[in-house]
Amino acid sequence: MLNSRFERMRNNPLTLPFYLPSLLLAFSDGMLALILPLYVADFEISYGTIGLVLAASGAGQLIGDLPAGRVISRMNARTMMIQGLVVIILSTLVLFLLPSIAAILVSRFITGLGMAWFNVSRQAYATEKMILVKRGRAMSIFGGVNRIGKIPAAQLSGMIAGTFNIRAPFLLYCIVASIALYFIWRYAEDSTSIAAASTPDQPRTSYREALRANRQTIFAAGIGQVFIQMIRKGREDIIPLYASDVLGLDVETIGTIGSISSAIETTLFYPSGIVMDRFGRKYSIVPQFLVFAVGMMLIPLTTNFTTLLIVASAIGAANGLTSGTMKTMGADLATHLNHHEFLGLWQLIGDGGITLSPIVAGAVAQATVLGNASFIMASFGVAAALIFAFYVPETLRKPDTESAAIVSKAPSKV
């Protein structure tokens, strides 16, 4: 029976080369999300400097996204995934070996370059394998897999840091990511480059042509995604720092909060996909990010472990109900363009928000207090919800709809 189940898993084009490595990498990223801000803070530097260091990987991603999108048009996605993940593993190993701010800054920047290479090629690989009418569910499962991986990550990384030292989780990151690398190398299929796969119905377009033809929709959706990624990243950075610096909680207790929040997120990822495929992408975006914003506003009002846990859990629930939304919308828009190339552009836009978030939060915390950074992040969540509600057209297309481009439709309201 186990052999037959494994055989069915192998026959699914996404399970072993996509979902399983994503699960392992989500676990690894979950460890870093908790430990890295605390590790950087141990060097007794200002909040502004902490923000710049935490933004280094995002800066690397920003620089790498467009080249990755360009190269994926001609190179095999499997090869690019392997190359990107090798860079991520080696640069993260530097965090374990060299305890200095300079080493952290350089290694995280290089990690960002590897992430750009890996993320663009991974989404291109998955988009090729997904059934259009079930894209929302497939992407929400991807988002759910990421959340499942993070459930034990925060708790375990806190325990490891408390038992050994705060750099020990970096070594475990490299080990787990190496296992993910094996599954990609062993089970991912060679995919055809977009240049070879293009058809007369899907003419190849450059970044400039894509922007010119669809600039209104891409601009609105892009700004909305920047704000969404800012509030998501802000939550990852602010909650551990607030728990440690303001509430005085230890690293293991902070890990417990992160794990419980992630567990709640995980229970809600599939309903997000059902809503996206049945009612529309915007129905999984607008209400949830308003709730997300309210949760961020409440962080500075918490006074102990219990109140912070309640707020973090509410934020986790809201984030779980948005699982896969940005990936799905990017894939929808990319369907009408040279999709591999556009995915680099879409990834660049999202990474811009990830990069800006710690810089903005650090600057606000440095100039005022840490709690005010949470209010700023909340305002970005409200802005994102309003933009997607009123300025971005619905990208869900039923099988019997006409083949007219999504971007030609007038914006619809939720």
Image (spheres, rainbow, N blue to C red):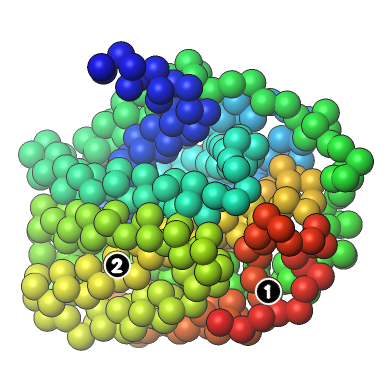
143 or 43, nearer to the observer: 143
Residue 162 image offset from top left, x and y in percent: 10, 45
Residue denoted by label 1: 393
Q: Nearest the camera: 161 or 352?
A: 352
Q: Position of residue 87 (x, y in %)?
A: 51, 30
Indicate the secondary structure of the residue bearing disc 2.
helix
Q: What residue did someone put label 2 on?
A: 317
Q: Position of residue 389 (x, y in %)?
A: 58, 81
User: Around disc 2, counting alpha carbons within 10 Å, would you say few (fewer than 14), some (14 to 19), or many (20 or more)?
Assistant: many
Of residues 34 and 96, the one nearer the viewer is 34
Is residue 42 visible in the rendered image? The answer is no
Residue 367 to residue 71: above or below: below
Residue type, numbered disc 2: Ala
Tag in front: 2 or 1: 1
- Name above or below for residue 397 compared with residue 166: below
Q: Is residue 278 left or right of residue 191?
A: left
At mark 1, the secondary structure is loop
